[in-house]
Image: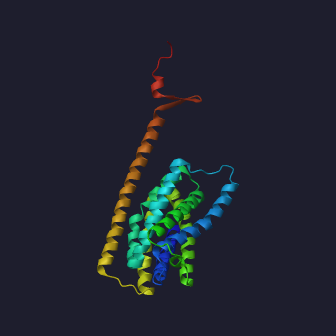
Amino acid sequence: MTLVLLQFTAAGVALFTKAAFMEGLSPAVFVVYPQAIATLFICPISFFFTWRKPSKPSLGVRGFWWVAFTAILGVAVNQNAYFAGIDLSSSSMASATTNLKSLKSFAKVKIAVHCPDHMYTTSWTCFMATIASFLMALALGNTDLHSWKLDSSLKLSCCVYSGLQLAVFFFLQAWCVSRKGPVFSALFNPLSTVIVTFFGVLCLKEKMYLGSLLGALAIILGLYIVLWGKSEDYQEEATELKLQDEHTNLSQLLIGDKAFRSSELLEPLLM
């Protein structure tokens, strides 16, 4: 149920931003604002809960690099491409291409291995993504103050909603990945495409073409094929680990309070 609600909120961002882009908001500038709002929203909460814990969480060097990788490529670069697609095409087609990034969920598994505190890792991801998005916006030519102005209520509300949605989305998705795995989390991503397509035609009067529909279906089908392959890999790994555990248990014999391996029982008792 949580993942279904997340897909509805993600669909709302796609439709909301399309309307804001039609008023002249730059996609590269827009990406920075939600990241900054998400950082300002979640960092104080993370600091409060971390401060109360007796053992403070830590990313470590490898965890830090995984967070940086996710923030730069999985968030900053990905969202710049995604929202540029919404600006240049329809929101429904751009939403379909987000299924190509579903494997980003697998990177969160690596982060959770190094630091299981999802609130802490989410705050770091949002902070790094804000810096990376700001530098990308400057590199794309948004150096004048006029392009950064939110001169309408639609632009302002769009940025605020997207920022809050982003913070909640990152945290809940990381939590779902840690509980159910990345495959289960990615299975719900095509739902957002269906929602955006329906409301895009209904509210934004977007035109749908047969080629776009076939392309979206091909992307979704490709996603499920990859996820099916990934799930098979996980099942094989789980089977191998189970067999190893059973082999270890069978190769031991409990005598009194001490466990002996079968190879140890072959040694002579008297020398």
Point out the residue furthest to the top here.
271
Residue 188 in view in this figure: no
Give the x, y percent position of residue 243: 42, 42
**Residue 128 in the figure: left or right of residue 199:** right
Residue 234 in view in this figure: yes
Say which residue appears at 57% left-offset and 84% top-offset. Answer: 153
Say which residue appears at 34% left-offset and 67% top-offset. Answer: 221
Q: Nearer the viewer, residue 250 or 221?
A: 221
Say which residue appears at 69% left-offset and 50% top-offset. Answer: 54
Give the x, y percent position of residue 230: 38, 56
Point out the residue furthest to the front here.
144
Give the x, y percent position of residue 235: 40, 52
Q: Quadrant of residue 125?
A: bottom right
Give the x, y percent position of residue 132: 50, 63
Residue 32 in the image: above or below residue 201: above
Say which residue appears at 59% left-offset and 65% top-offset. Answer: 39
Residue 200 in the image: above or below residue 65: below
Q: Nearer the viewer, residue 223 or 266?
A: 223
